Image: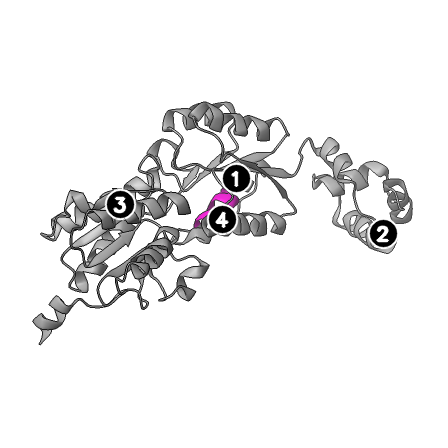
Amino acid sequence: MATIKDVAKLAQVGVGTVSRCLAGKGGVSAKAEQKVSEAMQQLNYRPNSLARALSTQRSNIIGVWLPSLSGPFYQHILQAIEFELRLHDKHLIIANAEEANSNEEYLQHLDYLINRDCDGVLMVCPEIAISDLLIAQTNYPPLVFINHSTDLLSKQSFSVDHYAGGCLAANSLLALGHKNIACISGRLSAQDAQQRQQGFVDELARQGRPINPELCIEGSFDFATSQFAVQQLLDKQLPFDALFCGSDKVALVALSILQGAGIKVPQQVSVLGYDDVDFAAVASPPLSTIAIPIKQMATAASRQVLNLAYDLTLTIPSVAEPRFIARASTQASPYLKIKEG
């Protein structure tokens, strides 16, 4: 196996020159850099990552803090992060905080990543208090937040306009003529769930169709809680002709339970999800949803952490607005058809 000395000998340069080429540091002429590159190819030399880390004082590892590994939402985020890091020859370590029950326990998972010499950390953290994020950012500057927005960390937080997404959901169902609209939110301690729920409720009120509080159920984004929330809504025995769910996962559960209870979707109740994850288009019936740019958001955050950790100047893409995707789980209500006729 070739060594750095072999490369230097073949290229007819010093070992220090080869080291500077590998580290990407200045002080190497274009001619010498070309000779080193050709020697490495000829010898099939691959730099030792540990040795390179020692020479550059960087691990080339980015930590990724996640509140959960379950569900397509986090899978899309991880795919986008891994793709962007790989483009720049960086790697990732994951900390899964699914079992944490407090801010203190959440932040212990951040310590886990920092103690493994990550050059930067991405945190998907809609439920961590902003005060704790500010402390973490002060103590560890190469820190970037995904699906969390705050003016205090505007250059290091990347999110979707979930409030606008909630407004769009309300307007989409109202445009179909629905009058009695129910809602199952995510856990409202999470910033993103709270924002989309608030946008939804506010827009219904602005349009003169304030939602009946009895038709608002706080849920979560796991299957068991979603089942309980949908059943809780049905047990109220209040009429509703449309249901907005705070995620596609909740909406998928709603489709199953509603149809199992003999309620036809969309003939009797339209069901609208949120996210537009992979299974939405192949649900039965295919799920109408509010599509959010999950991968754009994760890509923007990934580029920012690379800029901060490695002094790069990558372009940060803007994050698109939510969009309504019409599929077969929603249709115009009989009320709208009567008006049109």
**Pointer 4 and pointer 3: residues touching (CB < 8 Å)?**
no
Camera-side mark, 4 or 3: 3
**Pointer 1 and pointer 3: residues touching (CB < 8 Å)?**
no
Q: Nearer the viewer, residue 289 or 255?
A: 255
The residue labelled by disc 4 is 77
> Which residues lie in the magenta part?
297-305
Numbered disc 3: secondary structure: helix
Ranked by sequence position, the earlier of labels 2 and 1 is 2
Q: Amino acid at mark 1?
A: Val
The residue labelled by disc 2 is 39
* Magenta span contains residue 52: no
**Pointer 2 and pointer 1: residues touching (CB < 8 Å)?**
no
The residue labelled by disc 1 is 305
Q: CA distance from mark 2 to mark 4?
A: 39 Å
Q: Amino acid at mark 2?
A: Ala
Label 1 crowd bin: few (<14), some (14–19), many (20+), radius 10 Å:
many
Question: What secondary structure predominates along the stretch shown in magenta?
Answer: helix
